[in-house]
Image (cartoon, rainbow, N blue to C red):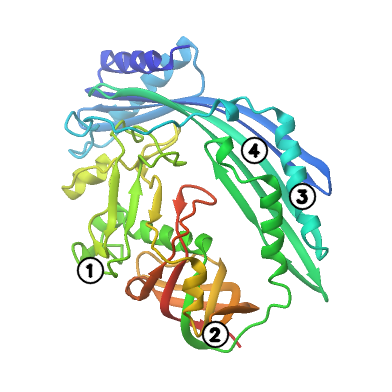
Amino acid sequence: MNYEQLAKKIVQRAVKKGAKQAEAYLEVGRTSSVRVREGQIEDLTEATSKGVGVRVIVKDRLGFAYTSDFTTAGLERVVDLAVQLAEAAAPSKLNGLPGAKDLGKRGDTGALFDPKVANLPGDWKINAALEAERAGRAQDSRVATFDSVSAGDFVAEVYLASSEGASGGYSGTYVYLVAVPVASQDGQLQTGYWLDYKRFLDDLESPESIGREATKRAVRMLGAKPVKTQQVPVVFDPLVAASFVGNLSQAANGNAVYQQSSVLAPHVGKRLAGKHVTLVDDGLLPRGLATAPFDGEGVPTRRTPILDGGVLSGFLYDAFTARKAKARTTGNASRGYSALPGIGTTNLYLEKGTKTPEELIREVPQGLYVTALLGHGADPVSGDMSCGANGLWIENGELTHPVQEVTVAGHLLQMLKDVDAVGSDLQFRGGSVGAPTVRFRQLTVSGA
């Protein structure tokens, strides 16, 4: 079936039915995954899905409906329903689809689809998960069990058409592997995890290295205890730094900024961090997990700096919020077929620095290397952050004993000022938010 043509036909029907503007957003997907435990397959799933969302504007009124019924009658019904819902809605001058000026030229995404992933045999996933578990057990005898080891892949296709001239489609592949071992010693249990998530099979870390690294991370926490309350330099490993980056992106959401419910709202154009701090949302990052030629409204994706050399340079917008805020959409409309677009990130990351993580740690006389944060992170409205933390104590530039049952606290704006070094080890581990190792001049570590 030609889904791009189908999307155009849906739009034509909506216009015929009285819509001034219409858009069809269509998704087709296939996913499969396996979970193993104690050398046995625990579950194996395969699923396919498809659906289309129809958005229409009738006399400044918005209507939206979706369906997974692709019969002619099913598609006619969903269009008619969207139009009926629009006729019953309250009008707003802000309603509308992106026009020609926002639908300009699309950038080059590079390859997004890997035939090796699309044609992965089921036994590859089983063998990869079993191999990761075996390697994790062989790494250290203190691994008592694995919470889970899973492997999976999915293939996704997106097609879009609108009455304003947007049209196109793309397909992408994704493959992942994750291991969660539990280490045990002297009655204490510690969990660690390690994972990799890529578009291309050849880019994926080997099952053996995933299993081994997961075990190392669990075992090194055995014997963890709190430290006394103090203010010290704190180093975030790349996974933890990525969650900090995610907090910053919530505060850079154009809608939150417009509503003055973001700690960043009053600071656009101001220097918030050192020149070594650049935070970017890049929908065109080569091989990025969220790379795509256009966003959920057909607007070309692009590279949008949020912090540029430490200066707050801009926020993320979809078309509706941009209209409201008298700004331009940044191509950050995110959605599935069953929902209206909202603001989301694409490939969001802190640009890497020049020092290795080892150098960042070596320069700390006494401090905390954080390997896990527990809790929600920073509040994007107030900027306050207080999270449970696990990690390793740094003494004279070396990692010494494991630490847990402590809280790390700070404020987003002060934390940005206090980023005194950024590592050279940029990683995208669990998805499309990436970061290198990050060091803060000081944070409050509250413990015993």
Element under disc 2? loop
Of callouts 3 and 1, the N-terminal one:
3
Identify the disc placed on residue 13. Answer: none
- Label 2 with label 1: CB-CB less than 8 Å: no
Check if mark 2's residue and mark 4's residue have beta carbons within 8 Å: no
Numbered mark located on residue 133 in the image: 3
Does residue 316 appear in this view?
no
Marks 3 and 1 in Cβ contact (< 8 Å): no
Residue located beneath label 4 in the image:
152
Total count of labels:
4
Q: Identify residue for label 2.
A: 396
Q: Position of residue 21 (x, y in %)?
A: 24, 24
Q: Tags 3 and 4 in contact by the CB under 8 Å rule?
A: no
Front residue of 1 and 423: 423
Q: Quadrant of the C terminus?
A: bottom right
Mark with earlier residue (1, 4): 4
- Which residue appears at 47% of the width and 41% of the height? 289
Q: Horizontal and vertical percent for residue 375?
A: 54, 66
**Residue 447 coordinates in the image, percent (x, y):** 58, 85
Q: Amino acid at mark 3?
A: Glu
Q: Is residue 147 left or right of residue 335?
A: right
Comparing 383 with 331, the one in front is: 331
Residue receiving disc 1: 271
- Looking at the rendering, which quadrant does residue 319 occupy? top left
**Which residue is painted at 34% across and 49% down in the image?**
281
For the residues labelled 2 and 3, the Cα–Cα distance comes to: 35 Å
Q: CA distance from mark 3 to mark 4?
A: 15 Å
Determine crowd level at label 2: few under 14, some 14-19, many 20+ residues with C-alpha closer than 10 A.
Answer: few
Q: CA distance from mark 2 to mark 4?
A: 42 Å
Amino acid found under the numbered disc labelled 2: Asn
